[in-house]
Amino acid sequence: MSSVRKVTEDLYWVGANDKRLHLFENIHPIPRGVSYNSYLLMDEKTVLFDTVDWAGCREFLKNVKEVLNGADLDYLVVNHMEPDHAASVEEILIRYPNCQVISNEKAFMFMHQFGFDVEGRKDEVKEGDTRCFGKHTVTFVFAPMVHWPEAMVTFDTTNGVLFSADAFGSFGSLDGRLFADEVDFDRDWIDDARRYFCNIVGKYGPFVQYLLEKAKTVPIQMFCPLHGPVWRKDLGYYIDKHDKWSRYEPEEKGVLIAYASMYGNTEAAAQAMASTLCRKGMTNVAVYDVSNTHVSQLVAEAFKYSHIVLASVTYNLQIYPVMYDFLHHLKVLNFQKRTFGIIENGTWAIKSGTLMKEFVEKELKECLVLNSQVSVNSSANESNEPEFEALADALIASIGK
Ligand SMILES: Cc1cc2nc3c(=O)[nH]c(=O)nc-3n(C[C@H](O)[C@H](O)[C@H](O)COP(=O)(O)O)c2cc1C
Ligand SMILES: [Fe+2]
Ligand SMILES: [Fe+2]
């Protein structure tokens, strides 16, 4: 008994699922878990593509052993050295002493830095090199900064399988399902896929674009990523999502309203803004309290929508710290190309609006702040009504463009 799944005639998923880990990279919550995918090719030579995190090593070793069924392991291809995939490399090398490691110069340098003993077992490849394992010939395509500098992807020219490393991955444990067409991806997985992409590789959009361009030159039939489902149907749907995310283009015309409020007055203003928009016909609105929504989700929602309203109290003459943290994440992730509306609040020296506008205009690329702004003095009243109307109208006009 094992969790092995057959991917193609002679390729097997031998990875592991992790439902115990609370925080991926010790920062991003993963309530649906995560999978560490590893693939074993049973050709004339046996070839393992990447390994798994320490947490999944037991399940993984059992899967590998079962598929090998007494055969030796000839090669281990290391596409990415991050420990969620490479932690079990040494364990494989110890158990299969004849196994050679195929990887690139930078990855071998990282193996050395992480203390792996691969001396005498290295087969170093360069961009475009090929290796033949019998029926299958693979070629190596470097994918720097997707998601580390040593990352590469491996393309099987025989059947069109792309071992895509962290590209085209997702949070979420597989729980028996392997293929994206075995789940309702657009209903149950896309939010986690977006949150994975934006927070893990979002910063490296131009590098993802570079990889997507390279991918157009080969006839890909299947994505075998290192996390989440394998894609064998409808690849265009997933490529299109990644194309948008990596160009920082929104998926949907709509408004994300993110508010920061201590006592509920700014929250009420955010809800009033949402109602005003909906009354005027713009119902694709998502409202989040920054204090109880993880920033990885706020970031993913920001990538999804075309327009963003930031509503924040003034706090010690600053933007509320949690709202500032959200804005800081957007900056670090290279977030771009959005239109913002501002709602500020304060009781004696209102500063948050000016500071948020300044942050968006100075720190985020190609982002615009609408002139109409709502300024709340402690709590919104009738005198604010024209501001709400004007900001809603400005948002709707901008969305319509
Ligand atoms: C620790 C703290 C610091 C604050 N600093 C400022 C400030 O610098 N300027 C200001 O106008 N209001 C300041 N305020 C007041 C709040 O911004 C104001 O009362 C606001 O209306 C609260 O909105 P809320 O109900 O959405 O929390 C501060 C409040 C707290 C608790
Ligand atoms: Fe990674
Ligand atoms: Fe990863």
Image (tube, rainbow, N blue to C red):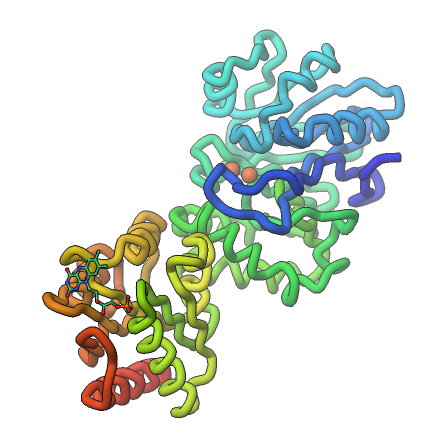
Q: Position of residue 87 (x, y in %)?
A: 59, 25
Q: Quadrant of residue 5?
A: top right
Residue drawn 23% across the image and 61% down it = 360
- Toward the top, the furthest residue is 120
Q: Position of residue 269 (x, y in %)?
A: 31, 77
Foreground pick, 124 / 331: 331
The answer to whether residue 225 is above or below residue 246 is above
- Quadrant of the rendered image holding ligand 1: bottom left
Image quadrant holding the N terminus, namely: top right
Residue 155 appears in the figure: no
Residue drawn 80% across the image and 27% down it = 62
- Toward the front, the furthest residue is 263
120 vs 298, left or right, is right
Counting every numbered tag in the picture gives 0
Residue drawn 45% across the image and 54% down it = 294
Q: Position of residue 225 (x, y in %)?
A: 63, 44
Residue drawn 66% across the image and 28% down it = 131
Q: Position of residue 204 (x, y in %)?
A: 40, 47
Foreground pick, 6 / 220: 6
Image quadrant holding the C terminus, namely: bottom left
Q: Quadrant of residue 341?
A: bottom left
Q: Quadrant of residue 161?
A: top right
92 vs 111, left or right, is right
Residue 77 appears in the figure: yes
Foreground pick, 365 / 17: 17
Foreground pick, 331 / 106: 331
